[in-house]
Image: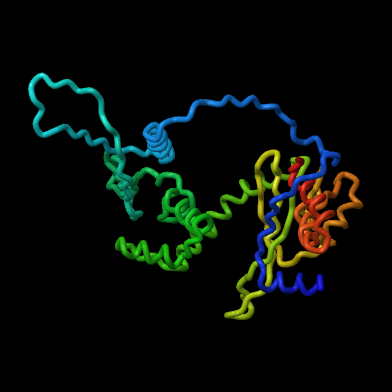
Amino acid sequence: MHRLEQLLKLSFGSKSERYLGTEQAPGQLRLGLLEEVAVEVTVTAPVSLETAKQIQRVTEKKKHFVIPESIVDEIQEIRPDVIPEGSKCTGSEVSYRLKCSPARLTAKKIIRYKYLLPTPAGDPGLTSKIIIAPLPDEVIKNCMADASLLATLIIEKYCDHLPVYRQMTRFDRSGIKLAHSTLLDWIAKTCTLLHPLYEKLKQEVLDSNYLMMDETTMKVMDKNKKGTTHRGYFWAAQALPANLVFFEYQPGRNQEVPQTLLCSFKGYLQSDGYACYETLAAKKDITLLCCMAHARRYFLEAEKNDPKRAAYAMDIFTCNPS
């Protein structure tokens, strides 16, 4: 019967693992993680209905988000059309209108003047030389894209998940036709320039003494078979103390991957129960920690079968002592 309930839950039930908690017995042991604080409550006289409405209006105004002054680029001051003589200004009301300037391509025109060096007296000018200033430093050699455009391409593709062909269409509306292959080439070369920063980020994460690690599948286009994909893996390592995370793509999820990624790591590693992480236990510098979410799930699933003991464990997981 229990197996049937589990199967029905997997097929039709909610994926949420929310637990509301139950009141524990007075003599139950406590973890001591939450300090009990005695709060003195002052009872005030009831307020009138009009006062309550005023408080509600003030509270509703406070809920509105605040426009940062850093994005204000225009100020419009409006006064009454007719101000009687002797009137005094008693203040002002401020409101905002959010504006948006559609992204568009602009260009910087670089003009380099050439100079013909003077020829010595008696020289027919056969050896005359022309000098010209060099071009400013370029992000990518012989590339017409400025650093601002390259940064926009990267952010829109990897942060906003905007495909390259949509960026190409947007540029086309501005009157600039850029080939799909050109944009891909610019993005690839920019990523190569950013690789040292990625390596630095990865080292910062691995220098932490506590990591959480997991891997997830992703479909990758297969160069050898057009129109098909193969399964790849994104490995993620997060250093909570420093609030840093790095992702690394690998074609598989065998035990050599975490062994290579964590070859310089020393500390506590928290993961799920995948067997490849257990091979790291042989390394003296790494202490394995189990995933609390995975352990908690079994008690949640057992709540209907044995509610009393399951509730005891769930209340401990949620740190919800009575």
The quadrant in which residue 295 appears is: bottom right
Q: Where is residue 199 in the image (x, y as percent from the top left)?
A: 67, 48
Q: In which quarter of the image is the C terminus?
A: top right
Q: Examine the rendered structure and indicate whether residue 302 appears above or below residue 6.
A: above
Q: Where is residue 254 in the image (x, y as percent from the top left)?
A: 80, 64
| Residue at the far top in the pictured view | 86
Q: Nearer the viewer, residue 312 or 196?
A: 312
Q: Can residue 208 be seen at all in this image of the molecule?
A: yes
From the viewer's perspective, is 43 left or right of 88? right
Q: Which of 108 and 87 is in front in this view?
A: 87
From the viewer's perspective, is 311 left or right of 249? right
Q: Examine the rendered structure and indicate whether residue 155 appears above or below residue 85.
A: below
From the viewer's perspective, is 180 left or right of 108? right
Q: Nearer the viewer, residue 66 or 32?
A: 32
Q: Examine the rendered structure and indicate whether residue 139 appears above or below residue 256.
A: above
Name the colouring of the figure.
rainbow
Q: Examine the rendered structure and indicate whether residue 95 appears above or below residue 264.
A: above
Q: Which residue is drawn at 48% across and 30% down?
A: 46
> How many marks can you see?
0
Q: Residue at x 63, y 70 (%)?
A: 219
Q: Which of 239 and 310 is in front in this view?
A: 310
Q: Can residue 256 be seen at all in this image of the molecule?
A: no
From the viewer's perspective, is 97 left or right of 308? left
Q: In which quarter of the image is the N terminus?
A: bottom right
Q: Position of residue 317 (x, y in %)?
A: 77, 48
The quadrant in which residue 94 appears is: top left
